[in-house]
Image (tube, helix red, strand yellow):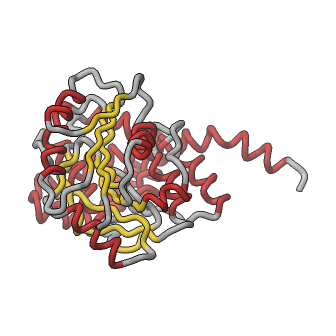
Amino acid sequence: MTTVSLIVPCYNAARTLRLCLESALAQTRPPDEIVVVDDASTDGSAEIAEGLGCRVVRLPENRGVSAARNAGVDATTGEIVFFLDADVALRPDAVAAALDVLAGDPGCGCVHGVYDTEPLIDDGPVEWYRILHAAHWRGRHLGEVNSVVFALAAIRRGVLADTGRLDETLRDCEDVEYSSRLAVRTRIVLTDRMVGRHDDGSRLLPILAEQWRRALPLVPLVLTTNRRGAAKPEHANRPAGILACALAMATVPLGLFSPALLAVPAALVAAFVLADPELVRFVYRRRGPAFTAYFMAVHLVVHTVLVAGLAAGAVRVLPGLRRRAAEPA
């Protein structure tokens, strides 16, 4: 029988870790081992894991999620490595579903799942924004994909060994970088048979700060992966919406010349909303018209930070691009 090692990277996740591990222990096909990699937590997370009978690997200093996942791989032996974030609780059949997908498709080396449309712990409207956005964008990419999100994913150990270790220098976008190496070696499948309920961020300012951090390295990463010839990853946001938001930001100063010219950015904001009508319908069906209006307002603010981060990241790499362009062929 195929063996499964379930690895949970953990940093100060005491609030959700018990729910996460209880869901892993309650699987219809239990993992052969569950290892929690404690990334120098200070909130008693390791003790929670030990209290539930899980093996704990303790890192002496905080090194980030990639280092924690690598340490978990080193500490386990299962033929299938199942990565699960500490703020996600699995449906009871998630491990069985992952094994079924991999067994039915020998060419698939990695399968990852989707988030439920309800949060693990309900912390208010900002979290609902995050949960519904994540559920929608993953749901529209079901099937063979070019990228993996390791928050809820199973991968063959041989494929991991062939692809190499996760880049421990990256604190954000580590999945994007790893996917650029993984997708050229094996098929990646995104399935709605593997489902987890996620406890996402619930305060707007920290979420915007996270979006900024994640946006900054995206342009350099995309340029690097393009040079490798890697396939493009799936988009969490519609490119047309990103463009409409960028143009709206760029045209706001027109109002300095005439208030009437503010109609231009206003029209572009409308174009931003219309860029993803499926998302609007998805949210409307689940939360109604008032929340949909709130959702799109938050979505616009998040996109504004995304565009600013992408622009800042592009500015950072411009000197290097100019130097390469000036070098003789």
Horizontal placement of 56 versus 25: left or right?
right
Image x and y of residue 84, in percent: 29, 49
Image x and y of residue 232, in percent: 52, 64
User: Nearest the camera: 77 or 39?
Assistant: 77
Image x and y of residue 93, in percent: 16, 64
Q: Residue at x 34, y 44 (%)?
A: 302
Q: Residue furthest right?
A: 328
User: Nearest the camera: 206 or 98?
Assistant: 98
Q: Residue at x 47, y 44 (%)?
A: 215
Q: Quadrant of the C terminus?
A: bottom right
Q: Quadrant of the N terminus?
A: bottom left
Q: Residue at x 35, y 25 (%)?
A: 40
Q: Residue furthest bottom?
A: 104
Residue 172's quadrant in the figure?
Answer: top left
Q: Residue at x 21, y 24 (%)?
A: 44
Q: Does 139 appear above or below 199?
A: below
Image x and y of residue 210, in percent: 37, 37
Horizontal placement of 270 versus 91: left or right?
right
